[in-house]
Structures are given as C-alpha cells and as structure tokens.
Amino acid sequence: MTFGYLLIAAILFSCILADRFSGKFGMPALILFMAVGMIFGCDGLFKIQFDNYGVAEKVCAAALVFIMFYGGFNTKWQSAKCVAVRATILSTLGVLVTAGLTGVFCYFVLHFSYVESFLIGAVLSSTDAASVFSILRGKHLNLRDGTASLLEIESGSNDPMSYLLTMIGISLLGNADTGNIPLMIFMQLALGILVGVVVALIGIVLLTKTNFIPEGLETIFVIAIVIFSFGLAELIGGNSYLSVYLLGILLGNSRIRNKNILIPFFDGVTGLAQILIFFLLGLLAFPHRMPDIMVPALLIALFLTFVARPIAVFGILLPFRCSIRQCLLVSWAGLRGAASIVFAIMVIAGGGDISLDLFHIVFMVALLSVAFQGTLIPKVAEKLDMVDNSADVSKTFNDYQEESAMTLMRMYIPKGHNWENHKICEVSIPTGALALMIKRDGDTMIPNGDTRILAEDSVILSVPAYESKEDEHLEEVLIEKNNPWCEQRIRELNLPQNQLIALVKRGEENLIPSGSTKIHEGDIVVLYR
C-alpha cells in the first residue's frame, strides 16, 4: 500500500512537470498528461497492467462531472451573452451535423457497420472544453469578435448533446426498441434542464438568502449539490451532464456567498480531474495496437477537421454574418479530447457487441486533434488576424478578479480649484489615498508633501478599492463599436433611476465621469446599481 501512495505521488509530480514544460514543447499540457499515462502503462517503462473499462468509466465520468460543472461555473455570462445564441446552436445543431457527416463518412468510405458508424460520429461530435480552455488561458489568447467566449460556451456545453447521441448509439447496439428513442431524447433534455435549474435555484437561495450553510463550508455544499444534481438526473432518466453544466452556469453567474473562495477551489479540483482523466486514458491505451487503427483514425481526423467541422461551423455562423476569418478559426479550434474518449469507454463498458477497436480509434483521433490543431491554434489565429492584443482573455472567465487592493484615480485641477497653489501636505486627500504623480505640461513628476499643485495639473491618486455591500453591485461593461453608448455623452444616455456610471476606465486611466463625459470605443464603464 505504501508503494501505491508513492506511485500516486510520482504520477502527480510527473504531470506537474509536464504542465510546467508544456510551453517549451509548444503543445497543450493535457496531451503530455496522456503521454505520462502511456509511460506508466503496460507498454511503457513502468508496465502497469490496466484494462478495466468499467472502473475507467466510473472514474472518468466522476471527473468529467466536475469539469462540466466548472466549465459552466467559470463562464462569465456578461462577456458571453452576446454570442450565446450562436454558441448554443453550435453546441446542439453543430454537434448533430458533425456526428451525422462523420457517421456517413465511416459507413460509405471506411465501410464500418451502421451502428459502429453512428457511434464513431456520436462520441467524436463534441469539442473538448478542457483542451480549449487550457490553450486560451495558457497562451493568453484573446480573440476578436467575441470568438474566445464563443469557443468557451460551445466547448463547455456541447458534451450533453454528444452524450445523448452516445446513449442512442448504445441503445441501437443493444438492439433496443427504436420506437422508444424519441421519448428518451425528450426525457434526457427536459429532465436534465429541469434538474439543473431547480437544484441551482435552491442552491442560490441557500447561499444568498439564508444562513443554512455554515461559514467556510460553502465548498462542501457546492460539491454536494453537484453530485446530487448529477445523481438525480441520472436516476430519473435526464441528461446528467446537461444538468451539472446548467447548475454551473446559474451558480457561477449569481451573487452567491464567498465566490472568491469557490472559484479557486473548483479550479484546483478541475485541474486534478483533468490530470486524472488524461492520465487514465493514457494508461488505458496500448501503443502496440496503434498501427492497426492508424489509417482509419487518421482519415477520420482529417475528415472531421477539414470537412465535417467546417460544414457545421460555416452553415451555422454565416447566417449570423460572422466573418470568414472567424468561421475558419472556430472550425480549426474544434478540438476532440477527453469527453470523446470517455464516451467511447462508456460504449465499451456497456458490453455491446462491437468489432471495432473503438477506444483506440477515438484515442488516436483525439491525440492527433490536440497535438496538431491545439498546438497550431495560436499561429492560425495570428495568420487570420484574429488575435486581439488589446484585451485580456482572462476577463471572459469568472475567476478574473476585477477588484484589486488599490486603484488609480486621476484628478484634473482646473483654475479656481480649491487645491490650486497648495502643497500636497495642505490639501484634503481622501483617507487611505496617496498622491503618486503629477502630470504637468507633458511631464510627469513624483511629488512629496512640499510639492505645490498648479492649475491644469493632473494629480494621480492611489485609492483603496471599494468593498461593496450585499445590496450594492458594481458591473463592468466593455464598450464595443456596436454598443449604443459608444460615442455618446453620459447625459444623453437613458439610464434607469437605480443605475449610474461610477467610473470610466480608459487605457491606464480611471476617469471620474460627469454628464459631459463622452464614452469611446474600448472604454470600460463601471455601472453602480
């Protein structure tokens, strides 16, 4: 048993090292986790014998639950809502189109059986959220036209549809009555949505309106409701992955207590879940079998990348007047990963009669996808001129901390101001604030207490960040070109009575606005509700 503990520690250390050096190898860390699993596997250096698909299914399904939940929990709705419709269509209709085209290719070109072709299309129809999130954040890759948020929502929400198709394929594999399939689809979707929404609303009420959850136990409570949501949906025939994703979206975008603690906690849990899944998938793989499936896997990967995915993406996004460049990038970023392999394990663990080496085909397709597509995403984005260097991709996630220990404020001193011709030590600077610099006639000076303030100076103050109360809310709004506030003065805006614009962030400056302040493209407007 002691050796087992040491082995687990060695595996985790190996994955941490793989993540640490992934940038030097120029590929996503997740693929290196797979490589670590293969090194420890039966064909690797450590010769660990593991081929129990039943155990692998249970472990990977449990880990995938928290990856799905955190994919929703960490999606920032404020950034994502402008692309939510097209992303949702991509994650539903796009999955169906991709699965259908891939199945047709496998049936007519590779001559797989009808059910086997359907299953290949089903398990490979979704894009992998863990891989997409890892690349966007690891490479600090912010994309134009809301493309980062589009990919985040699509990859985070399309696993439930792929899971539904996989369940249909398993039913067909077991010769189930096809007449029950429409009812199963309805029950999966309706009950999955119902469970996710109801459990989320109960959780939000308990975390915001009551003291039922003791201070410090919010993480335990959220773990409990995630597991409860998944289990309840599974019990009554709903789509369990859909329920936990909706639970994550609703909880993550509500004003629940101690979210600043919950986000880093579940970020760590998800990181461990990703390591576990990708390592276990590598451990389950037998590299000596790869040559036998290399040709069909390579053909399927090429078809998915250059035919099925682009047809689905262009067919859905072009009617929304998305640019060709954006469609090309979204097509290329359709990575296959852990979810596809986990669904393939579910098929095998289900015990159906299938002649294909389904696991290794899907494993190889995912490996090729993450290795080549994933590695090249930054270069493809750059070639398509889709990289937005003026924005921060971290702001599209809920774990981005907009608050800081201090913030900077510029005070312009007009003629007649009560600070004019006074020394710094003589004026009434707000408590906790510090005069950092004075901008005068194009020059910048570092002041001391004896520095005299002149008319037309700009005094830059460091002031403590404001801690809002439960009944107050500050919200940041990025002003894009099509925003109705763009190039409007604040007094011209028809703001509700319970709202005001408290701050305008422009570049490195924080401006205290007045009615005559004009809002420009690229400004970040801080709304007080």
Image (tube, helix red, strand yellow):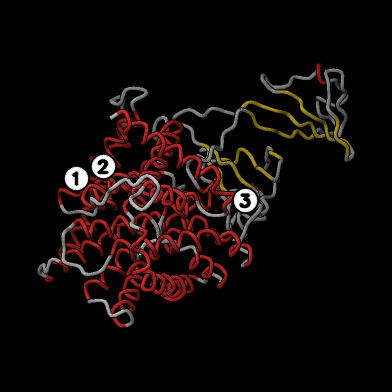
Q: Work out whether residue 55 can be spotted.
A: yes
Nearer the observer: mark 3 or 2; the answer is 3
Q: Is residue 5 left or right of residue 517?
A: left
Image coords of residue 79 (percent x, y):
50, 51
According to the picture, the residue beneath numbered tag 2 turns out to be: 199
Q: Is residue 150 above or below residue 274?
A: below
According to the picture, the residue beneath numbered tag 1 turns out to be: 232
Where's the N terminus, which quadrant? top left
Q: SS at mark 1?
A: helix
Q: Amino acid at mark 1?
A: Leu
Alpha carbon distance from label 1 to label 3: 40 Å
Q: SS at mark 2?
A: helix
Earlier-in-chain disc, 3 versus 2: 2
Alpha carbon distance from label 1 to label 2: 10 Å
- Disc 1 vs disc 2: Cβ atoms closer than 8 Å? yes
Alpha carbon distance from label 3 to label 2: 35 Å
Q: SS at mark 3?
A: loop
Earlier-in-chain disc, 1 versus 2: 2
Q: Residues within 10 Å of mark 1 (few under 14, many from 20)?
A: many
Q: Amino acid at mark 3?
A: Ala
Image coords of residue 414 (percent x, y):
82, 34
Which residue occupies the foreground of this view, 401 or 39? Answer: 39
Taking the spot 66% from the left edge, 50% from the top edge, the residue there is 519
Residue 146, quarter of picture: bottom right
Q: Residues within 10 Å of mark 3 (few under 14, many from 20)?
A: some
According to the picture, the residue beneath numbered tag 3 turns out to be: 391
